[in-house]
Amino acid sequence: MAAQRRFWRLRCGDGPATAIRSPPSEPAPEVEIVKDKITVPAIASRKAEGPRVTMVTAYDFTFARLLDGAGVDILLVGDSLGMVVQGESSTIPVTMDEMAYHVRLVARARPRALVLGDMPFLSYQVSAADAVGNAGRLIKAGAEAVKLEGGVYQAATIEALVRAEIPVVGHVGLTPQAVHRMGGHRVQGRDEQGRRRVLEDARAVAGAGAFALVLEGVPLDLAREITQELSIPTIGIGAGPFCDGQVLVLHDLLGLSDGSRPTPRFVRQYAGLGALVAEATHRFCDDVQRGAFPCDLESYHAPGSELRVASEVPRFDTVAAMQGWAEQQRAAGLRIAFVPTMGFLHEGHLDLVREARRRADRVVVSIFVNPIQFDREEDLMAYPRDLDRDVALLRDEGVDAVYVPRAEGMYAEDFATGVGVDRLSVGLCGAHRAGHFRGVTTVVTKLFHAVRPHLAIFGEKDFQQLAIVRRMTRDLDFGIEVLGHPTVREADGLARSSRNARLSDEARQEAAAIPVALDMVRQALGEGMLMAEALARVFRDSIAAHASTARVEYAEIVDSDSLEPVVAVDRPAHFAIAVWIGGVRLIDNVRLDPGQASPSRLGRNERLVGGVSSRSHVATEQAVMLQARRGC
């Protein structure tokens, strides 16, 4: 079952109230939902033993399965179907044939919940014999009990049904089948005379042998009095919180409405499916008319046929459009994973997308080259862009939506707000790129507000950025899980990056020295070199030996959480580097673990490492290691 536990507590949005069975003080004890079949005796026992009874209307197989899986105790096949299914203005037109049909649909779900069938207008009022015969039809269709409206005047009928071994739930107060006598759907029992009448009806129903009683549309103090007096459970609808249980019409609970009818005061909508259904259908119509549905993945192919259908992925370029889509997914209970990018996607980005797909129901990718995180104008202008290519790649990965905001939409001319994370932003890249991380955290904040994700996935290559975003998300209570995903590397070990495309052939060959140098640092650590300064020298010397035109901007070992520099690697830490090669700035990092003797090698470039056949390289490595050890 989807819901295996629930809390026994009073829910009331208007403040505290005194219950007959006072809800326990926090933390509330968890009450296991009984997995055994719910029976009439089980419902009757709730009066003394609890927990409160839950009842929801159901009219078909599918919703019966869903509601039962969620832990509802009683599925009421209500004559309310006349209004919410058939579009009538009252329940009066519903017939016995229609009730038996819908009871059969719900019973086919074989629910754990008790199936309760409503007896429609004039199916029990004419005579007790008619009542027994019609109730028997509902029982044969699959109902396990029946419900009928009325109190004193129906007591004899209830007795006849009980004698015929048909369990009965009574219904007093506002009785919809008496809508004409009451002059509409009006609250009952507000004056003294009405109060006495409802109380007498409740007593008559209990005295006649009903095992439970629905109280509808009565003041909460009257419902409390009746609940205190009767020995059978009371189930309220518009009767306040003091009953032994509550019932809602399915369509009210889920917000399955087009808004043409007013929502009763007593209804709490737990979802807004009406608007969601309308929007989903609108999108379906739009996709069909644009030729976007069905796509190739939604089509069948004959063996040997090469005919394929070009498909599309939804693109949103405004905050309102992106938020609207995200809210629809959230309202449907779907989990959203978000992968922010600056585009020109590579296998590293796509690996993040695949991880997002494994962890969520919907995947959103943003493509936005953020101008406020670039400290050099020429770097911003040179950043590679190919939106159509990127969207095609994301379409092939099954991404559900792409957010492509416009720069003017993200930052108005008078934009004056920024988000900064102190301490974590000052070292490493922050020491060399003024304002960079303030630009990153500002744009990520805006993207989070637009996409509304449950989960955001960042690559561990940008290690400092990941740490900063995690801290910002925690400090500002975003309620978003930030997940780091391992760095994806080229065949020779170089970290995949959009910037790699800007390397010339010669620079790309020299860049292969970076993973080799990182391997040497980890090898030195495994052989007992612990001092951070010496390990950094191993990296710098290796780069100098294998990439003559490279310039190391920084090579530092920092604490994995605080990003503070460490003196010695006596516990796990991170080695982070930035190297300029051929006018392109490349960053990378590796985890250093002093307890790991022989980590797997990153570098795979035989030109540089050469295995045992490259004696000169081995000798160079040994010399560098020896020199570093002497300085340790």
Image (tube, rainbow, N blue to C red):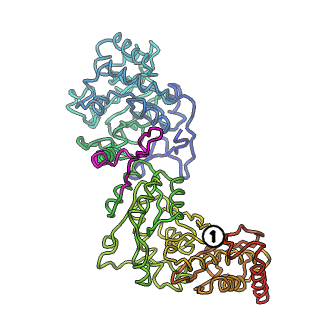
Residue 302 lies within the magenta run? yes
The boundaries of the magenta stretch are 285-314
The image shows residue 337 at horizontal and vertical percentages of: 48, 57
Q: Which residue has dot 1 on it?
A: 493
Q: Is residue 123 left or right of residue 499?
A: left
Q: Residues within 10 Å of mark 1 (few under 14, many from 20)?
A: many
The image shows residue 301 at horizontal and vertical percentages of: 44, 40
Can residue 244 be seen at all in this image of the molecule? no
Q: Observer-nearest residue: 527 or 119?
A: 527
Please name the residue shown 39% across and 31% down the image.
Answer: 58
Q: Secondary structure at mark 1?
A: loop
Q: Observer-nearest residue: 206 or 382?
A: 382
Please name the residue shown 40% across and 56% down the image.
Answer: 401
Q: Quadrant where the N terminus lies?
A: top right
Residue 177 lies within the magenta run? no
Q: Quadrant where the C terminus lies?
A: bottom right
Please name the residue shown 30% across and 34% down the image.
Answer: 84
113 to 581, vertically: above or below? above
The quarter holding residue 621 reads bottom right
Q: Dominant secondary structure of the magenta stretch? A: loop
Q: Is residue 149 left or right of residue 498?
A: left
> Could you tell me how many numbered marks the image carries?
1
